Amino acid sequence: MGFMKNNKIFALISVAVLLLSGCNDANTSSSSDSQSIQTDTSNTATSDTATSASDTSSTSGGTSASDSSSDQPINSYYDDISITATGLSLQTSLRSLVTTTHTTETTYDGLREVFKTSDADPNNRGKIIWFYTGTSVTFSSFGGSNGDTNREHVWPKDAGKAFPETSKAGSDAHHLRPTETQINSIRGNKSFDIVPQTSANIAKQNGSTTYATGDYLSYTDSTFFYPGKGFRGQTARILFYVQLRWGQAYNLRFVLGSGSSKTIGDIETLMQWHLEEPASETELTRNEVVYGIQGNRNPFIDVPNYACRIYANDGQSYNSKVAGVCNSF
């Protein structure tokens, strides 16, 4: 009886040991499976992210994958614009957007009141800032004499040959800027590019150069106008907007080198300026002000990479030059 009792006890102990061993194996297996699943998920996410970055880079018109992440518009205005579209596809979508939302046309005379807000000097109440020179001036009306404020068509109107002088593209507040009359005249119909910075080439405001020094001076020769520092990027973004909004209606096109009437250059240099000089707080504020007046926006201020995605891929002879600039940033 004692032997049988001991056997029963031994058997019970053996069963308990086996049960405990099975539980440990199950726990070990479960832990291993769980770790394996987590590892697989991590690898999948990494792979998908890399693929996504690669795909975006290949469609971004010469821009890097890291740049394309900044294409995510922060403004709901662009909700219907594809974040991967390039070239004519992107241009067509954006053109439709800025055209259909352009619900109020600014009049040529109405620019007087617009400029008081859109180009107001944030540091000097009641004054505006002249484009190209950065001069803060008191403004009440337009004039034609040296030292007066004039309306600058950044894309030259060429005496109405390019587009109507005082309506449509000729009065769009995203396009026209207040300038000093003589600077406006000196610039004339010239395209934009780098000009040798010699004393003979300084674009003189009102017969003097006291308004700026160094890099902030504008220069000009017989072919090109070279805006001062701080106005080069703005100039490029204005021209990108004009070509987008009004290019189809008036056959406005970019070229390499100098343009004439309906063409303007140098697109390679303009892209360089656009990327070198991002929009300032003043430019961002101006975009908001004009948006509140006209209903449309300048996309190249809001989403800078739209410029590379369009003009490095729109089927023009300058594409490779523009792509080269975009790839350098």
Image (spheres, rainbow, N blue to C red):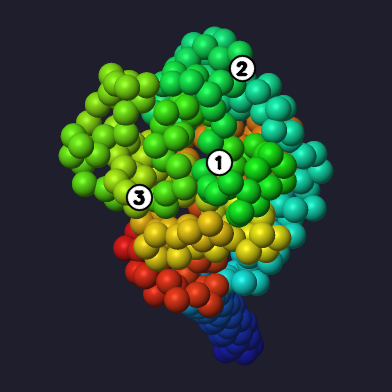
Instruction: Give amino acid for label 2.
Output: Ser
Q: Which residue occupies the foreground of this view, 120 or 201?
A: 201
Which residue is the site of mark 2? 141
**In which quarter of the view is residue 293 placed?**
top right
Q: Which residue occupies the foreground of this view, 80 or 55?
A: 80
Q: Tell me if label 3 and label 2 are in contact, CB under 8 Å.
A: no
Q: Tell me if label 1 and label 3 are in contact, CB under 8 Å.
A: no
User: Quick one: label 1 or label 3, which is nearer the N terminus?
Assistant: 1
Q: Is residue 18 above or below residue 314?
A: below
Which residue is the site of mark 1? 153
How far apart marks 1 and 2 lie (CA) works out to 17 Å
How far apart marks 1 and 3 lie (CA) works out to 15 Å
In the figure, is residue 282 to the left or right of 226? right
Give x and y (percent) for residue 57.
Answer: 47, 72
Could you tell me which residue is drawn at 56 percent across and 59 percent down? 262
Q: Is residue 258 above or below residue 201?
A: below
Can residue 160 be spotted in the picture?
Answer: yes
Give x and y (percent) for residue 85.
Answer: 61, 70
User: Quick one: label 3 or label 2, which is nearer the N terminus?
Assistant: 2
Could you tell me which residue is drawn at 39 percent across and 37 percent down? 186
Which residue is the site of mark 3? 224
Could you tell me which residue is drawn at 62 percent across and 40 percent down? 174
